[in-house]
Amino acid sequence: MTTTAHPRRWALGASAGAALAWAGLVAHAPAGFFVAAAVFCLLWLPLSAAAAPPGLAARLRPGPADLGLGLLSGLLLFAATRAFLWLFCGGLSDALCAPTADLFGRFQPRGLAPALVLGLLVAPAEELFWRGVAQAWLARRFGAERGLALAVLAAAGVALASGEPLLALATLPTYAAWGALAAWRGSLVPALVSHATWTLLVAGFLAPR
C-alpha cells in the first residue's frame, strides 16, 4: 500500500504545481506561446494521468453519446459567451472591450498549428487536471456536488491570482458546466470535447476585428 500511494501523492503535487505554472505561463504569454504551451501540456498530461484516481482509462473511453453531448454543450457555451460579451462590449456597456481585445491579442491562434495546440493539447491538459484529478479527488473527499464547486472555485482563484480576471470570470460558468458533465456522465469525454469546441470557437470567432 505504501509503495503505490507515495508515487500518487508525488504526482498529485507535481500536477497541481504544473497547474499553477500553467496559469503563470498564460498570464505572461511569452513570445512563442503556442510552442511553449505544446511542450508544457505534453509534460503536464502524463503527470495528471499519474495523479488521477483509479479508473482513468474507463473515464476517457469515448462513446457516441458523450461525443455528441460534448459537441452540443460546447456550441451552447459558445453562444452564451458570445451573448455575454456582446452585452458588455457594445450592448449594455463597453466594460469588457479592452480586456477582451488584450486577451485575444495575446492568444488568438493564427494558423492551423496553434489551433491544434489549443484543441488537442491545451483543452485536454486542463480537463485532465481540473476534472480528472482535482474534481475527482475532491469528490471522493467531499462528495460530488461539493467536489465540483471546490474545483471550480480553485480554478477561478488560480486564474484570478495570476492576474487574468477575464479568464477567472469565464472559468466560473464554463468549468461548472464541464464539471457537471463529468459528474453526470462519469466520463471526461463530454467535458473534454466541449472544452475543445468552446475554446476553438471562441478563439476563431470572438477575436476583435
Image: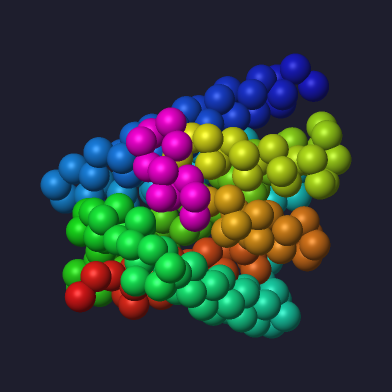
Question: Where is residue 42 drawn, in percent x and y?
Answer: 39, 48
**How many numbered discs sit on the rendered protein?**
0
Residue at the limit of the structure toward the front, as seen here? 92
Residue pictured at 70% horizontal, 20% vertical: 3
Q: Quadrant of the N terminus?
A: top right
Q: Is residue 43 above or below residue 189?
A: above
Question: Where is residue 145 drawn, in percent x and y?
Answer: 81, 46
Residue pictured at 52% horizontal, 64% vertical: 195
Prevailing SS of the magenta stretch:
helix
**Side (left or right) of 31 relative to 10:** left
Q: Is residue 82 above or below residue 102?
A: below
Residue 42: say if magenta. Answer: no
* Frontmost residue, 162 versus 56: 162
Which portion, as a residue range, is magenta? 160-170
Q: Is residue 135 above or below residue 68?
A: above
Residue pictured at 59% horizontal, 45% vertical: 130
Question: Where is residue 94 drawn, in percent x and y?
Answer: 33, 62
* Frontmost residue, 34 versus 145: 145
Residue 165: say if magenta. Answer: yes
* Frontmost residue, 162 versus 136: 162
